[in-house]
């Protein structure tokens, strides 16, 4: 136990990723199964909540699980599907983040339009919960990345086309720009708060169009949202070059 106590949290997180990942790969945890609660994982593996959350984040990035706010974390699969993925190393610069935003504009604008036509009341309920979680996180000083990604993931799921949802899950929460480069581009607190509120306002516009089943409005709202994020990174890139 003393050796365990001396190991770094990052090492413990990687060991937890391996342990949970093995359970998924051998079928002990199957697609659609809900993972044990954070408290249960903490007790079983004798690790902190921080370690559990880091491990879950890595499993999400690997496309093995997804977290639905207020519901839990669920197994997506054994990770042996299509090999396409964007690695953390491919997010190392602002140009990398801009390139991923360009990919997302192509993918998510059409997903939003499709979701507007095919969404269910259950899809809408989870989207609303994600926006509420985003707003709460912002007001308490958190980054709101999990709720942000969940909102976009639920739009992909609302297309009722599993390929959209699977691709978004494979990309993982790292596609949210704040998850990669916020430390180099973070504005002052008041400006950051205003920015995050504006982001969620853009989310609300997307949701309103999906609720109204207006495909063109949903497509336009998503394009505006992602284009705004891209332009913000372009401005940051220009400032760093000067």
Image (cartoon, grey):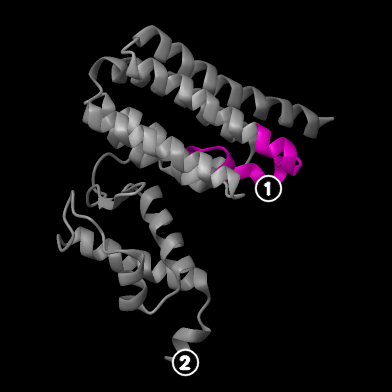
In which quadrant of the rendered view does residue 173 lie? top left
Q: Residue 183 carries which label?
A: 1
Q: Earlier in the sequence, mark 2 or mark 1?
A: 2
Label 2 Cα neighbours within 10 Å, binned few <14 / some 14-19 / many ≥20? few
Tell me, yes or no, if residue 110 can be seen here: no
Q: What element carries label 2?
A: helix
In which quadrant of the rendered view does residue 155 lie? top left
Label 2 vs label 1: CA separation? 34 Å
Q: Which of 241 and 16 is in front in this view?
A: 16
Question: What residue sits 38% from the left and 79% below the top?
Answer: 46
Quadrant location of the C terminus? top right
Side (left or right) of 116 relative to 231: left
Q: Which mark is residue 2?
A: 2
In the image, the segment drawn in magenta is: 175-194
Question: What residue sits 60% from the left and 25% below the top?
Answer: 230
Residue extending farthest to the right is: 242
Find residue 70 and report its horizontal and vertical position in percent.
34, 49
As drawn, 154 above or below 3: above
Q: Nearer the viewer, residue 235 or 136?
A: 136
């Amino acid at each position: 136990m003393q050796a365990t106590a001396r190991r770094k949290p990052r090492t413990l997180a990687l060991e937890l990723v391996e342990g949970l990942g093995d359970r998924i790969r051998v079928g002990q945890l199957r697609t659609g199964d809900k993972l044990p609660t954070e408290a249960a994982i903490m007790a079983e593996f004798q690790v902190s909540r921080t370690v559990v959350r880091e491990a879950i984040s890595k499993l999400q990035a690997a496309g093995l699980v997804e977290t639905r706010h207020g519901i839990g974390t669920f197994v997506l699969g054994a990770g042996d599907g299509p090999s396409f993925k964007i690695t953390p190393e491919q997010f190392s610069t602002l140009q990398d983040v801009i390139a991923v935003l360009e990919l997302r504009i192509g993918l998510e604008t059409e997903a939003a339009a499709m979701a507007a036509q095919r969404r269910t009341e259950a899809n809408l309920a989870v989207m609303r919960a994600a926006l509420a979680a985003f707003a709460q996180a912002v007001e308490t000083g958190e980054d709101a990345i999990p709720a942000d990604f969940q909102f976009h993931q639920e739009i992909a799921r609302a297309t009722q086309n599993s390929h959209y949802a699977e691709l978004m899950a494979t990309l993982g929460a790292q596609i949210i720009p704040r998850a990669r480069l916020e430390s180099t581009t973070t504005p002052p607190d008041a400006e950051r708060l205003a920015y995050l509120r504006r982001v969620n306002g853009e989310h609300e516009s997307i949701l309103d169009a999906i609720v109204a089943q207006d495909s063109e409005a949903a497509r336009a709202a998503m394009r505006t949202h992602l284009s705004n994020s891209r332009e913000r990174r372009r401005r940051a890139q220009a400032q760093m070059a000067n």
